[in-house]
Amino acid sequence: MQIGIVWLCQASGVLAHDQSGSLGAQASATDYYELECFDDGNGSPEHLFFEVRGDTRNTAVQVSGQVVNGSQAASATDHTSGDSSYSPQLKVVHEGDNDVYRMVIDKNGPGVAQYSLQYHCETGNGVHTGTSDLKFLQVQ
């Protein structure tokens, strides 16, 4: 039984990467991250999946995430902060030789907002491939 539990935990860790953060009280508070997708032996990256969740309960503040790769950009918003659901999942296709994805996390008004991110790189066949840790460019 313990082997099955360990396997499940390891499998979930392989499929997604998680990051928690907090946006300060100012309405303009913005966190800015960067990550890279790469071939870790499972295949060349074809896209990045990304979703954001507002974790602060009892607030009207909505958390959004934007992802940019080359000339492509996509945005998703978690419209109900404090529940267990994430925003719609973004799929940003890998463009040319640009392995770098930039992520912006912001909100729609004043008030501290806790958030969670899930992200991972995949091949064209949907196989998880190399996903770097997030590099913090700006944390507010």
Image: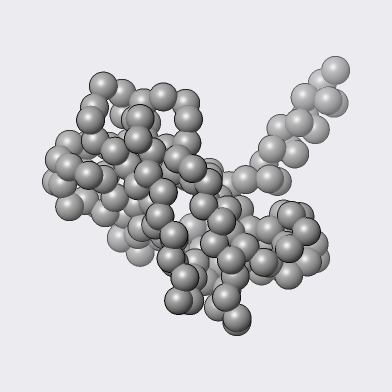
Quarter holding residue 96 = bottom right
Q: At 60% across and 70% down in the image, what residue appears? A: 94
Give the quadrant of the N terminus: top right
Residue 70 rendering spot, x and y as whole percentages = 48, 76
Task: Between residue 70 and residue 119, name the one nearer to us.
Answer: 70
Q: In the picture provided, is 56 more to the left or to the right than 97?
A: left
Residue 135 rendering spot, x and y as whole percentages = 45, 62
Quarter holding residue 58 = top left
Q: At 15% across and 40% down in the image, what residue appears? A: 110
Question: Is residue 25 in view?
Answer: no
Above or below residue 3? Residue 76 is: below
Question: Is residue 110 in view?
Answer: yes
Task: Between residue 66 and residue 31, name the one nearer to us.
Answer: 66
Q: At 31% across and 54% down in the image, what residue appears? A: 31
Q: In the picture provided, is 121 more to the left or to the right than 3?
A: left
Above or below residue 129? Residue 21 is: above
Please give the count of numbered marks on the rendered protein: 0
Q: In the picture provided, is 2 more to the left or to the right than 56?
A: right
Residue 122 rendering spot, x and y as whole percentages = 68, 58
Q: Residue furthest bottom?
A: 97
Task: Between residue 73 and residue 52, name the one nearer to us.
Answer: 73
Quarter holding residue 126 = bottom right
Q: At 73% across and 70% down in the image, what residue appears? A: 44
Colour pattern: one colour
Residue 101 rendering spot, x and y as whole percentages = 49, 67
